[in-house]
Amino acid sequence: MATTETLPQTPIALSSRAADEVRKIMTTKNVPDGYGLRVGVRGGGCSGMSYILGFDKQRDQDMAFDIDGIPLYVDKRHGLYLMGTTIDYHDGLNARGFTFNNPNATKTCGCGSSFAA
């Protein structure tokens, strides 16, 4: 059973634009109660690792955070790779979507969704 303890300091920050877009998606896509924003990493991509961003229920191995009323879940094993990351949202002519500014990335790719740490 997942713990309901919410830790006070999150390793990840959401810009105000990203938080607004997450809230909009949660409302328009009818994300069920009990789900939160899952941020993580997985092997793959042209630089070795890629980001995970989606909605999910909390799992036993998760760290849980609250960012401006948005439940955020991070697998404990992924926290090291995400420490200090800021997620932003761009909605312009040249770029649209979520971006990750990760100070732990030693190498990134042109698409911005893959990195090496």
Image (cartoon, helix red, strand yellow):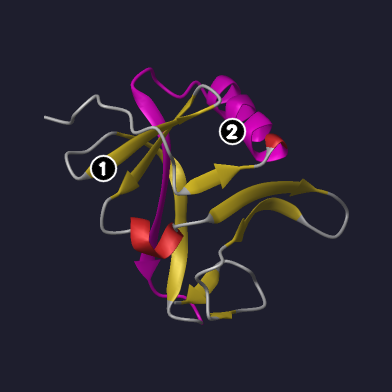
Residue at 29% from the left image edge and 41% from the top image edge: 63
Range covered by the magenta-colored residues: 17-46
Q: Work out whether 95 lies above or below 46.
A: above
56 vs 93, left or right, is left
- Image quarter for residue 48? bottom left
Residue at label 1?
62
Residue at label 2?
22
Q: Amino acid at mark 1?
A: Asp
Q: Name the N-terminal-most of marks 1 and 2.
A: 2
- Image quarter for residue 7? top left
| Element on which disc 2 rests | helix
Q: Is residue 23 magenta?
A: yes
Residue at 44% from the left image edge and 49% from the top image edge: 11
Disc 1 versus disc 2: nearer the observer: 1
Image position, residue 27 (x, y; %) = 57, 20
- The answer for how far apart the CA atoms under marks 1 and 2 are is 19 Å
